[in-house]
Image (tube, rainbow, N blue to C red):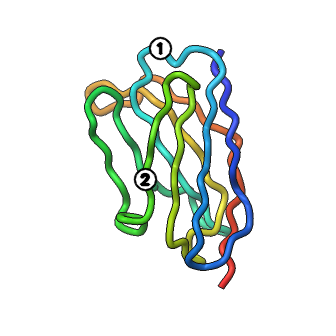
Amino acid sequence: QVQLVESGGGLVQTGESLTLSCLASGSLGGVDIRGWYRQAPGKEREFIAWTKLHWDLSTYSDSIKGRFTISIDNSKNTHYRQMTNMKPEDTGVHYCNPRREYGGSTMEEYWGQGTQVTVSR
């Protein structure tokens, strides 16, 4: 059974930086995508970014492109999201989402409990 623990959220001011962590306990095995989502107050959860292990392939939403970076430390079973030049619209609960896909379908996925990020003006 895989459990995820997210950390690193908090209150920052516009333009500041923050790094979120997602620690997985248990083996993620063939789960080769590390994703991140955000849910702003009163809105649905939205895609932020993902990276695919072993392929050096990443995708970022337009809203965060150039400001956020995903990195992975396999030795610690942890992946990170570095956020720079943060904006008030980055405010929300941020979730990590490791998953495995095949043929365009999600075959296995896990969600963290979320960590609150608040960006003040």
- Name the residue located 57 percent from the left edge and 69 percent from the top edge: 90
Q: Report, in whole angstroms, how far the alpha carbon at label 2 lies from the one at label 1.
A: 23 Å
- Name the residue located 60 percent from the left edge and 47 percent from the top edge: 95
- Name the residue located 53 percent from the left edge and 22 percent from the top edge: 75
Q: How dense is the environment of label 1, judged by Cα within 10 Å: few (below 14), some, or many (20 and up)? A: few
In this picture, residue 21 sits left or right of residue 5: left
Q: How dense is the environment of label 2, judged by Cα within 10 Å: few (below 14), some, or many (20 and up)? A: some
Residue 69 disc label: 2
Local secondary structure at mark 2: strand
Q: Position of residue 34 (x, y in %)?
A: 45, 36
Local secondary structure at mark 1: loop
Residue type beneath disc 2: Thr
Residue 86 disc label: none
In this picture, residue 54 sits left or right of residue 25: left
Q: Nearer the viewer, residue 61 or 18?
A: 18
- In the rendered image, which residue does mark 1 sit on? 29
Look at the picture and state if 75 lies above or below 105.
above
In this picture, residue 98 sits left or right of residue 32: right
Q: Nearer the viewer, residue 50 or 80?
A: 80
Q: Position of residue 88 (x, y in %)?
A: 60, 77
Look at the picture and state if 40 lies above or below 14.
above
Q: Quadrant of residue 116?
A: bottom right
Do the residues under discs 2 and 1 have CB atoms within 8 angstroms? no
- Name the residue located 56 percent from the left edge and 57 percent from the top edge: 38
Quadrant of the image for the N terminus?
top right
Residue type beneath disc 1: Gly
Q: Position of residue 16 (x, y in %)?
A: 59, 72
Q: Quadrant of residue 23?
A: top right
Q: Nearer the viewer, residue 109 or 51?
A: 51
Quadrant of the image for the C terminus?
bottom right
